[in-house]
Amino acid sequence: MVIPFILMLNSGCAFAAFLILKKKRSVIHKRLERVLIGLGSSVMSLAISMNVQLWLHVLAFAIYLSVLFGVAIGVVFGLLDMRQLMMIGYQQGLIGGLMGAMLGAVVLNPSLCGLPAEYGNSIETHTAAFSFFSLFLSAATVGLIYFINESSEVNSEV
Amino acid sequence: MNTTDGLKEVVALFVNFLAVFFYANALLTAGLYLYARSRRQMMGFQDGIHIAQMASGFIALICGVVLIYQFPFHYVNVTIASTLIGMAAGVIFGALFHHEALLSGYAHGMMMGLMSPMIGAAAKNSFPFLLFVELFFMFSLVFVFHFIKKRNDSW
C-alpha cells in the first residue's frame, strides 16, 4: 500500500530533476551537463525500477517491466539537450534499472543471496524500509542537482 | 570445556579482526584523502573524477562486506550504512576538485554501496573472500597513491 505512494513521489522527484536540468541546460557547461544527466538517469531509474519490482512482484514479467522503466527514464533524460547524450542516458539507465530490479528481487526473496532464513518473517518491513530509502536517495539527488546548478551557473559563462 | 573456550576465543578474535579491518580501512582512506588534498593543485580534469570514483567505490565495497560479515541479521541497516558511507566518501573526495568529480563520486559510491552487502551475504562468511576484497581495496589505494605521485612528478 505504501509502495505506489512512494513510486508516485519518486516519479515526482524524477520530473523535478528533469525540469531543473531542462531549465538550466543553456547556462551550465556541457561536461557538467553530461555528468548531471548520468547521475540523474542512474539514480532515478534505480529508485523507480526498484519500486516497480517491489510493487508488481506477483507478475511474471515484473523484472522485464522494471528494467524497461529504467531504460525509458535514462533515454528521456538523455534526450534532454543533445542527441549524443542519449547514449550515456541509455547506459546509466540500463545499469540503474538492472540494479534496482536485482535489489528488489533480493529484498523479496532473501535466500537468493544466502541471507539467513529469519528474513522471511519481515519481508514487509524490509520492503517499506527500502522504499523509503529509495525516496531519500532520489530526494537527496534532486537537492544535489539543484544546488550544483545554482552554484555553477556563473562559472560557465567564461 | 577446553574446546568451547577455544571456540569462543576464536570467535572473539574474528570479531575483533573485522573491527580492526574496518578501522584500518577508514584510517587508510583518511590518509589517502590528506595526501590527495596536499597535491590537488596539480590534478587535471579527468583525474579528479577517477580519484573520487576509485576511493568512494572501494571504501563502500569493503565497508559493506565487513559490516554484513559482522551483522548478518541486519541487511537493511547494513545496506543503508554502506550506501551513506560511499556517498559521503565520494562527496568528500570529489569536493577536493570540482563539481563533476563530486557528482561522479556520489553516484559511484552509491551504486557500490547498494551492491556490496549483497555480495558479502552471498559469500557466506568465507574468510578468503574477505582477504580477496581487502587485497583489491589495498591495490586500489596503492594505484591512486601512485597515480597522484606520478602526476605530481611529471609537472
Image (cartoon, coloured by chain):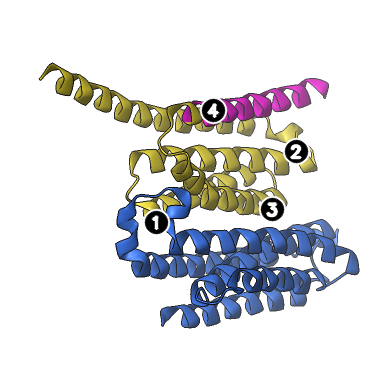
Chain colours: A blue, B yellow
Secondary structure of the residue carrying tag 1 is: helix
| Residue B149 shown in magenta | yes
What's the mark number on residue B132?
A: 4
Chain letter for mark 1: B
Query: Closer to the camera: disc 1 or disc 2?
Result: 1
Residue topped by disc 1: B76
Q: How many marks?
A: 4
Query: Which residue is tagged 2?
Result: B47
In which image quadrant can residue B153 be found? top right
Q: What residue type is labelled 4?
A: Phe
Is label 3 in a helix, a strand or a loop?
Answer: helix
Q: Which of the two discs, 2 and 3, labels the residue nearer the N terminus?
A: 2
A5 over A141 or under it: above or below? below
Label 3 Cα crowd, 10 Å radius (few <14 / some 14-19 / many 20+): many
Farthest residue toward the top? B2
Give the CA distance from mark 4 to mark 2: 26 Å
Question: Is residue A152 shown in magenta?
Answer: no
Q: Which mark is first along the chain, 3 or 4?
A: 3
**Sequence-first disc among 4 and 1:** 1
Q: What residue type is labelled 1?
A: Val
Q: Which of marks 4 and 2 is nearer the N terminus?
A: 2
Instruction: Kindly report the distance in space between the C-alpha atoms of the residues bearing marks 2 and 3.
Output: 13 Å
Residue A148 in view in this figure: no
